[in-house]
């Protein structure tokens, strides 16, 4: 298992750098035939902890979304399932399952690129993070490199439809 935190201890990133790294992960997913979604987890200082990309098909696992893959690795590296102060960057608006995991991990913030009008749980379909009865409130920010994130998804599905 890679120790990303050790390798990238001095890799503190701004919003665009983190989303470009997530886009690189999304491209890896696309290259593997997965829906191109990538995620990056940063600590409270903005330094890289972990990365992940969709592995649903590869792993035969409906929970292997990019966010879950990145959260699992981050939790192992940190040695705790709770990641207070951490931020997760993801190329596509998270679904309900992923937002539930992020809330449970006590992330400070989720930053996403492209909105998901079909299953987005950060405001497009549902706003899970805004439910007043939750004991933890994770902030959500949308639109970082949204055009690049949307373009990667559009091209993937355009190519897939053309093959069919």
Image: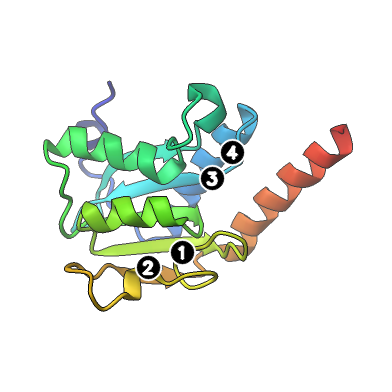
Total residue callouts: 4
Between circles 2 and 3, the one closer to the viewer is 2
Q: Work out how far the residue at label 4 is from the one at label 3, CA to CA, in angstroms.
A: 8 Å
Residue of label 3:
37
Of helix, strand and loop, which one carries label 1?
loop
Counting residues from the start of the chain, the first of labels 1 and 3 encountered is: 3
Q: Quadrant of residue 64?
A: top left
Q: Is residue 152 above or below residue 123?
A: above
Counting residues from the start of the chain, the first of labels 2 and 1 encountered is: 1
Between circles 1 and 3, the one closer to the viewer is 1
Residue in the foreground of this view, choosing between 117 and 46? 117
**Residues at marks 2 and 1 touching, judged by CB atoms closer than 8 Å:** yes
Mark 2 Cα shell of 10 Å, populated few (<14), some (14-19), many (≥20)? some
Residue of label 1:
121
Q: Residue at x 88, y 38 (%)?
A: 162
Percent x, y of residue 69: 37, 36
**Residues at marks 2 and 4 touching, judged by CB atoms closer than 8 Å:** no
Q: Is residue 55 above or below residue 11?
A: above
* Numbered circle sitting on residue 81: none
Q: Work out how far the residue at label 2 is from the one at label 3, CA to CA, in angstroms.
A: 20 Å
Q: Work out how far the residue at label 1 is from the one at label 3, CA to CA, in angstroms.
A: 15 Å
Of helix, strand and loop, which one carries label 3?
loop
**Which quadrant is the N terminus positioned in?**
top left
**Which quadrant is the C terminus positioned in?**
top right
Residue of label 2:
128
Mark 3 Cα shell of 10 Å, populated few (<14), some (14-19), many (≥20)? many
Between circles 2 and 4, the one closer to the viewer is 2
Q: Work out how far the residue at label 1 is from the one at label 4, CA to CA, in angstroms.
A: 23 Å
């Amino acid at each position: 298992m890679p120790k990303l935190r050790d390798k990238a201890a001095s890799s503190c990133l701004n919003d665009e750098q983190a989303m470009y790294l997530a886009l690189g992960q999304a491209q890896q997913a696309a290259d593997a035939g997965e829906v191109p979604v990538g995620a990056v987890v940063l600590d409270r200082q903005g330094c890289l902890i972990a990365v992940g990309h969709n592995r649903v098909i590869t792993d035969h696992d409906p929970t292997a979304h990019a966010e879950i893959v990145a959260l699992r690795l981050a939790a192992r590296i940190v040695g705790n399932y709770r990641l207070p102060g951490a931020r997760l960057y993801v190329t596509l608006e998270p679904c309900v399952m992923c937002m539930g995991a992020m809330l449970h991990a006590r992330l400070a913030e989720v930053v996403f690129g492209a909105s998901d009008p079909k299953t987005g749980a950060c405001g497009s379909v549902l706003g899970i993070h805004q439910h007043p009865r939750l004991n933890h409130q994770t902030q959500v920010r949308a639109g970082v490199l949204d055009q690049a994130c949307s373009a990667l998804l559009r091209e993937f599905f355009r190519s897939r439809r053309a093959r069919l």
